[in-house]
Image: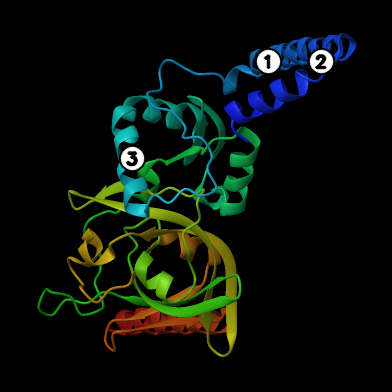
Amino acid sequence: MSQEAMLAAINAELSKADAATMSLVLDALRNAKQAQSQRTFRANDLFKALPPRMQTASEFVGENQPFDPKRSLSLHGRATIKRQIKAQNREWLSGQFQKLKAAWIMIIDGQVVASGVSLATYPKPEQILEACHRTGKFPLLFIDEDHLAIEEGGSRWHRTNIPGDYYPSVPLTLRSNNSSTLVLGDFDTGASSTFVDYEWLVKQKLVHLQIQEDAESSHHLNQTYAYLPRSFVVEIASKPGGAQALEITIACVIDWKNSPFVKVNPDRVALVGRDVLLALRPKVLLDFDARRTEIQTKKAAKQARAQSKKTTRRAAASSKRQ
């Protein structure tokens, strides 16, 4: 009912009321006004009582958007807004990363309210959603670009655009909820993190964008790219029949086909960095003659080391005889 209709209905009822009834109505209106004033006062007091970390800091430029469960902004749109805020606060963010020794930070009302020393603790979508409900705002999450550093160069294996050049490949199984898929990624010891084609993951039904998530941005080969940090159970298989698995945060790169990750290998769908291998600690044999990667069991690795020692001793004995 509109305000005009409500007033008309009230006036119609008051025209029929006696003095006693009108006095009761007047008291009710005054009491309602007083109660509203008290509710506003309590809300203001609650804001003042918030801890300092939740209050606006003049050093940070930008605001958290109010939480809206129906937010329809595309991932590209979110990435653009996030990139602008990041550019405005680059020096401030760098100082926070150094002070907290953090790989990621969460900002609400200009203050860091959560952080982690590695991407292994990066908030999951449900944790971000909880922060939205608790604060009534979309939190801003930033990742230190140094934790996604990719060193140029290194050994190659899969066939690339360079004649006679190859990138080593590593087979990984990615699991999320009830879906899983096998990906043959290029293995790069110069990359600290792992990067996968976001659109490819969507087709594999491993990822779907949620309202509380925002894209991050970074640089590689002098080109900016956007990505969505997402946690997966990563499994690496070894022969015979063995497997190792662990939950790891991976950078899901948006618009992969136009990203710097395909400049050398246009057919690449994933770049596997040191994070996966350091976490799972497999024994990896790179056979440059056959251009194959073998994930060894501990038993096989032990036998290979023993065989290597025997070969070394034989070579040393032969050298002494000569």
In percent of the image, x 35 and y 82: which residue is there? 315
Q: Give the residue displayed 65% in from the left and 36% down from the top.
A: 134
Disc 3 versus disc 1: distance between alpha carbons? Answer: 33 Å
The amino acid marked with disc number 3 is: Ile
- Residue at 37% from the left image edge and 53% from the top image edge: 75
Mark 3 / mark 1, whichever is N-terminal: 1
- Residue 115: name its quadrant: top right
Which image quadrant is residue 89 in?
A: top left
* Helix, strand or loop for disc 1: helix
Q: Quadrant of the C terminus?
A: bottom left
Report crowding for label 3: few under 14, some 14 to 19, many 20 or more residues within 10 A (C-alpha): few
Secondary structure, mark 3, is helix
The disc at residue 40 is 1
Q: Residues within 10 Å of mark 2 (few under 14, many from 20)?
A: some
Q: Position of residue 32 (x, y in %)?
A: 77, 16
Q: Is residue 272 left or right of residue 205?
A: left
Instruction: Examine the image and state in which quarter residue 166 appears.
Output: bottom left
Image-based side of 124 in relation to 267, left or right: right
CA separation in Å, label 2 and label 3: 51 Å
Q: Nearer the viewer, mark 2 or mark 3?
A: 2
* Amino acid on which disc 2 is placed: Val
- Observer able to see residue 292: yes
Q: What residue is shown with label 3?
A: 81
Position of residue 94 relative to residue 210, above or below, is above
Residue bearing mark 2: 25
Circle 1: residue type: Thr
